[in-house]
Amino acid sequence: MRDFRELKVWEKGHRLTLAVYKATARFPRDELYGLTSQIRRSCASIPANIAEGCGRGEDAELARFLRIAMGSASELEYHLLLAHDLNLLDTSDYESLTKEVTEIKRMLTSFIQKLTADG
């Protein structure tokens, strides 16, 4: 069993989630149960799945949860694009958040490859 708090990818995912909550706090109230909720949920799912995978004890299980985290990251990428195109997210925030998601996806890919190569 691994301590998820020691993983750089989990830390980046957690920091991204905090940034996403801050950015979406400025969204209109009528989006609270729509896009705001979708963005926050998909983002929080990234570090949550990393943490859950770490608690499973086996590399194959961890890799499976890292793939789920990757899917959530891709979902987040789309939701951020949609929010930007709807003028809910300014270009600066969009570019910054998207850059972080891209880095997390790269890290997840490397981690998955390492786990599956060792197993």
Image (cartoon, rainbow, N blue to C red):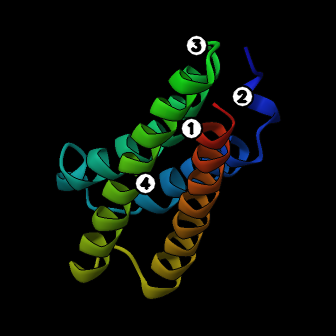
Q: Which residue is mark 1?
A: 47
Quadrant (top left, top right, bottom left, bottom right) of the C terminus:
top right
Mark 2 / mark 4, whichever is N-terminal: 2
- State the mark number for residue 73: 4
Residue that appears at 58% across and 45% down: 112
How far separated are the C-alphas under marks 4 and 1?
A: 10 Å
Whether tag 3 and tag 4 are in contact, CB under 8 A, the answer is no
Q: Report the amino acid beneath label 4.
A: Ala
Q: Which residue is mark 3?
A: 56
Mark 1 / mark 3, whichever is N-terminal: 1
Q: Report the amino acid beneath label 1.
A: Pro
The image position of residue 106, as x and y in percent, is 59, 63
The image position of residue 114, as x and y in percent, is 68, 45
Between residues 64 and 14, which one lies in front from this camera angle?
Answer: 64
Q: Determine the secondary structure under disc 3.
A: loop
How far separated are the C-alphas under marks 1 and 3?
A: 15 Å
Between residues 44 and 31, which one lies in front from this camera angle?
Answer: 44
